[in-house]
Structures are given as structure tokens and as C-alpha cells.
Image (spheres, coloured by chain):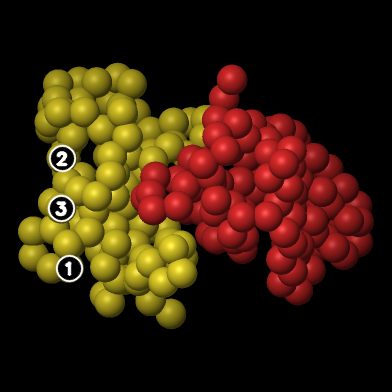
Amino acid sequence: QKEVEQDPGPLSVPEGAIVSLNCTYSNSAFQYFMWYRQYSRKGPELLMYTYSSGNKEDGRFTAQVDKSSKYISLFIRDSQPSDSATYLCAMRRTGGFKTIFGAGTRLFVKA
Amino acid sequence: EPEVTQTPSHQVTQMGQEVILRCVPISNHLYFYWYRQILGQKVEFLVSFYNNEISEKSEIFDDQFSVERPDGSNFTLKIRSTKLEDSAMYFCASSEDLTGGLETQYFGPGTRLLVL
């Protein structure tokens, strides 16, 4: 079983749609859960992170962590064409430096 | 806005040759990282570096790899004898501190390495 699993997509939605991106993981030691956005030919950019379980909201973005199910989600409200990118989930255990990334979901938002 | 820079943007080398990838982290940052991304695959952690020593490394980071911060501003990744499977995009990242246990890592634009 892979440590982090993420559907690579692609996911295509119309502008204004709510987007749901998800990852599952197997290592219960993970405590930090991150979402990165990566545009083509660029390095990843941290969107938001959550510690342990719960929700976190930042503008149009909401991150959710359900540790009991080992499942994390990123919701994008009112999606825009500029949100078209690859979204990477990532995780790390407390006290560690090693970040484990998912494969990334490629999102297309059509105008 | 300060950013992480990497040179070269592209490097082509012959199998068995040594390559050095260079990174200039953001100036007040203390933690430094190398990642790689093989084409079409996920981003993989290679190594983290703090206080002039490796703080953690992955199983990928074997004896062929080394890192160095030679002069207080550059951070380098050396691959001693490149293999075909080393072809990938290599990203450098840096962060300011570990306040609260997690820091924001800023990634550079990457160096695309092609081993022939």
C-alpha cells in the first residue's frame, strides 16, 4: 500500500464550480497535512496546511483532515480558470523533515 | 518578493559524469531541502539540511549524492556518477524556521537534469 494515494485526474470543471480534491494515507504518524499548487514547469507552492484533524479555511480554499479515516480533502469554492494547475497533497510526521507527496491531481477550470 | 533561485535551469550530462546543481535560498532562511520529480511522477524528498548538517535523508539519497552549503548563500546538490534514472526535475526549497512544528517551504523553479 502506498503511503499517500491521490487520484491524478485530470479533473475538468466549469468556472464557478466547487472542486473537491482528496488524498488517503496509510501512516498514522502523519500529523501535518499540506496542499500545494504546482503550475506547469514551476515549483510547488504551499496553499495551506493543517495540523492533526479538523478544518481550515483561507478565502476560497478549505482543507479538511479526518485522521480516523486517514483522508484529507481540499475544497475550492467559486473556481476560476487561474486555479487550473496540479494540486499536490503532502504529509509529514511530527519532528520529521521528510515530506511525502501524493501524485498530484491535475485540475482544469473552463471559462 | 524574495525567492529561491536555481541554476542551471537545464543540464544535459553523460552517464557516469558528476553534476552539481546550485540553489540560492532566501537569505534569512535556515532550513534547506532538495526534492526531485521524475517526469510524470510525484515529488520525492531527497534531503533536508540545517545548521550545516543533514537533518534527514530519504532512501534515494545514497552515497552518490551529497549536499553542501559552501559559502553561506549557496546550497548545492552533487551527484557523483550520474545514472540514466537520475534524469528528473530537481527542486530546492528553503524555509525560515520550524515555529509550531511546520514551516512554509519556498520552492525554486527547478533544474531539469537529463542523463544520456
Q: Are marks 2 and 3 on the same chain?
A: yes
Which subunit holds the residue at mark 1? Answer: B
Instruction: Classify mark 1: helix, strand or loop.
Output: loop
Q: CA distance from mark 1 to mark 3?
A: 15 Å
Chain letter of the yellow region: B
Instruction: Classify mark 2: helix, strand or loop.
Output: strand
Q: Colour of chain A?
A: red
Crowding at mark 1 (Cα within 10 Å: few <14, some 14-19, many 20+): few
Which subunit holds the residue at mark 3? Answer: B
Residue placed under numbered mark 3 in the picture: B53
Residue placed under numbered mark 1 in the picture: B73
Above or below, B75 against A67 in this view is below
Observer-nearest residue: A22 or B110? Answer: A22
Above or below, A26 against A80 in this view is above
Identify the image quadrant of the N terminus of chain A. top right
Identify the image quadrant of the C terminus of chain A. bottom right
| Precedes in sequence: disc 1 or disc 2 | 2
Instruction: Classify mark 3: helix, strand or loop.
Output: strand
Residue placed under numbered mark 2 in the picture: B66
Residue A8 appears in which quarter of the rendering? top right
| Precedes in sequence: disc 1 or disc 3 | 3
B97 sits to left or right of A60: left
Can residue A27 be seen here? yes
The residue type indicated by label 2 comes to Ser
Residue at 48% across, 31% down: B39
Q: Are marks 1 and 3 on the same chain?
A: yes
Q: CA distance from mark 1 to mark 2?
A: 17 Å
Residue B28: where, in percent of width, then height?
A: 27, 77
Q: CA distance from mark 2 to mark 3?
A: 11 Å
